[in-house]
Amino acid sequence: MDTRHPTIARAGDSALVVIDCQERLWRVISGAEVLERQLAILMRGARILQVPVVVTEQYPKGLGPTVQSLKDAAGDAPVLEKMTFSCAGDDGFQSRIRELERGTVVVCGIEAHICVLQTALDLLADGYAVQVVADGIGTRAPSNRDVALRRLEQAGAVITCVESLLFEWMERCDAAAFKEIQGLLK
């Protein structure tokens, strides 16, 4: 079907970026337990649907590694260390995203109003279509998350959620991955 709305994500044109879900900051994130579950579902679903996953870590020496359950969900996805708040400000990240040759970058992780926000805005400025997973981002203070979502939507990012995204990537109920994806969501 060639007439789908341009904001519907396609697995073959998407990359998933999981930003800075690191141990030392994770314990102070509002709703971290639910967020962790949603992110694990999203990453496993992306892998099933062959959407490349990139994981970033902000100054891991100080903030620690990625939360273990999310590292497990990411499988063999590359983990890129960075010092910039925006992933797009890091040369290694820029190279990796270009190598993937995807037009849509889906962003999730923490913190919504800092690294997620700056990354998404910079990716938009670089010409990518950006989707932000509302139930896949977190902050210490929920009001900061709300502000970030409003800014991102005003800037042109598509706000989505884990289930919508997985079903958009899958496209059909007779897709080979349908039962696997359903199993993740139960």
Image (spheres, rainbow, N blue to C red):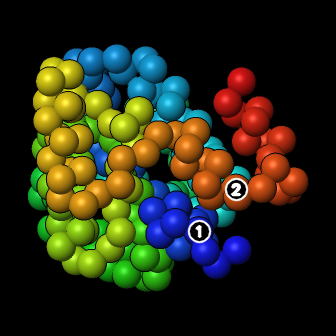
Name the residue carrying label 1.
4
Q: Is residue 80 left or right of residue 115?
A: right
Q: Nearer the viewer, mark 1 or mark 2?
A: 1
**Residue at 27% in and 78% down:** 127
Dot 1 lies on which element?
A: loop
- Horizontal and vertical percent for residue 31? 34, 17
Name the residue carrying label 2.
170
Q: Quadrant of the N terminus?
A: bottom right
- Horizontal and vertical percent for residue 150? 19, 42
Which three-letter amino acid code belongs to the residue tagged 2? Answer: Met
- Horizontal and vertical percent for residue 59? 18, 47
Q: Quadrant of the C terminus?
A: top right
The quarter of the picture where residue 106 lies is bottom left
Q: Which mark is residue 32?
A: none
Q: Residue 92, relative to residue 145: is it above or below? A: below
Which three-letter amino acid code belongs to the residue tagged 1? Answer: Arg
Give 93 or 184, whichever is nearer the viewer: 184
- Horizontal and vertical percent for residue 81? 27, 57
**Residue at 42% in and 69% down:** 104
Q: Is residue 15 left or right of residue 91?
A: right
Dot 2 lies on which element?
A: helix
- Mark 1 or mark 2: which comes first in sequence? 1
